[in-house]
Amino acid sequence: RAAKLVNRDAAPLLWYYCFPNLVKTLLVRDDAVEDLAGATHGIGDPAENKEGYLSLNKQTISTWGNLKDGRDRYQVFPNLCQKLGSSLATGENRISIKSLLRQVLGIHRAFMKAFEEDSHFLKLREPQFMEKCAPRGKGGKLWLRFFLLKEDFNTTVTFDHLSKELKPVFSAVTPGKLGKKLGGHCFESTHRSFNRWSADELPELQDEIRSKIRTLILPRGYLYYVMFERENTFPQAVVIYALMFYLGSIVRYRPYDFDKLVTKKYRWVIDEFLQVAPKQFVILMLNELTQSGISYFES
């Protein structure tokens, strides 16, 4: 409530300090509460960032891939990455702020305008879990099928580039009648076998495909996308968490730089992020905690 009520110049720091508490609620399900009680952030704002806060192009966040630091203290950010299926490399990692901004689905239009880039996201059309049963009820196969419209591809996201990016989780197959009608390419996940009920295998399939699917949560429901990104890719919750830490760090330690930053061409991107990202993060984390798809909420 405090973060929602204050002005933009203070909101990032308040939002960020809400985020670790929600993340710890997820982490404490499997990790010792004693470790979390003495946890460190596990993410930092490198000293050299102060030379270029107004550009964003050279900005990074730093994090060590180790789950505990050199003093054996639990590190929240690396553990969150591991929990969401995107473990960091051991040692120091530098992650580009620009690449993180590009991965936030809810602000992608603003990002393209500010940085003059093509879209890196393609919307899934007609996504559907498919089932093929064996004779006499002896199990069968389960997979996800979706289409990508040819008109959505661009010079950045070509069919060949994206096909390589999606493998081995998804493979391009013959479009068939529906694909020709839509004017799209057809992709299918690996076909998973089940012995009796397809629903028994569904959680395993969902775990397998989640690294390639991005979710945008709207009042009317969910939209799903795939993304092409040459740099490191992370789950939406991890990206939002890291960016809010970065903005909160500027607000806390160099507030005059934050004021200058938001008066330049990045203002639309940052305003959009502060408006959209917090609610997306909360719902994504609640979905992780409950292992379900909670619908959008207003309060």
Image (spheres, rainbow, N blue to C red):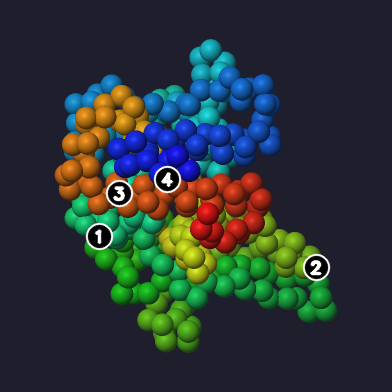
Real-space CA distance between mark 3 and mark 1, rounded to the nearest whole angstrom: 20 Å
Q: Position of residue 28 (x, y in %)?
A: 66, 33
Secondary element at tag 1: loop
Camera-near label (4 vs 2) is 4
Q: Nearest the camera: 133 or 233?
A: 233
Q: Position of residue 191 (x, y in %)?
A: 62, 65
Query: For mark 4, what is the residue?
Result: 4
Q: Residues within 10 Å of mark 4 (few under 14, many from 20)?
A: some
Query: For mark 1, what is the residue?
Result: 118
Query: For mark 3, what is the residue?
Result: 271
The structure residue drawn at horizontal position 25% and vertical position 60%, both measured from the top left corner, is 118
Give the answer, above or below, for where 72 lies relative to 296.
above
In the picture, residue 254 is in which quadrant? top left
Query: For mark 2, what is the residue?
Result: 196
The structure residue drawn at horizontal position 60% and vertical position 58%, both measured from the top left corner, is 294
**Type of residue at label 4?**
Lys
Real-space CA distance between mark 4 and mark 1, rounded to the nearest whole angstrom: 31 Å
